[in-house]
Amino acid sequence: MKRNYLKRLNFKKLEKQNLILKIINNNKILSLERRTKYSKIRHIYGKNSSITLIRNNCIKTGRNRGVLSNYGLSRLEFKKQSSKGLLPGIKKSS
């Protein structure tokens, strides 16, 4: 979970620069040399600045599959807590 937290911090820090470099890289008006230069700079940031590699994990268990994004809990932990009545506004449907 610590690695995922560090990826989120790194993405947040580099988000604006990465977006600007992406726009410059896709701009066909600029010369090819200039676009390649900015593309290399963007490549230096690496994969840790990418939003697609950030995973959602359960807050309590750290499970990364079946996470309900509204609650930040895995489906198993959500079921346990809702059956105990710990989640306000949630009740059994049947």
Image (cartoon, rainbow, N blue to C red):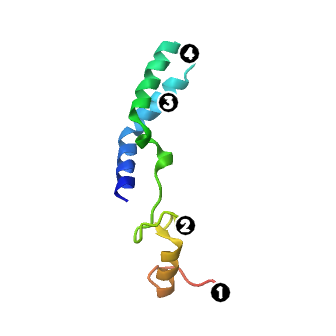
**Position in image of residue 93 (x %, y %):** 63, 83
Instruction: Indicate which disc, 3 or 1, sits on the residue closer to the N terminus.
Output: 3
- Mark 3: which amino acid? Lys
Question: What residue is drawn where x is 46% and y is 15%?
Answer: 34
Question: What residue is drawn where x is 65% and y is 86%?
Answer: 94
**Position in image of residue 16 (x %, y %):** 41, 36
**Which label sits in the foreground, 2 or 4?**
2
Q: Taking 5 as reference, is 79 left or right?
A: right
Instruction: Indicate which disc, 1 or 2, sits on the residue closer to the N terminus.
Output: 2
Q: What residue is pinned by disc 3?
A: 22
Give the spatial CA distance, label 3 vs label 1: 49 Å
Q: Which mark is residue 94?
A: 1
Task: Check disc 1 and report its element: helix, strand or loop.
Answer: loop
Q: What residue is pinned by disc 4?
A: 29
Question: What residue is drawn where x is 47% and y is 25%?
Answer: 39
Give the spatial CA distance, label 3 vs label 4: 14 Å
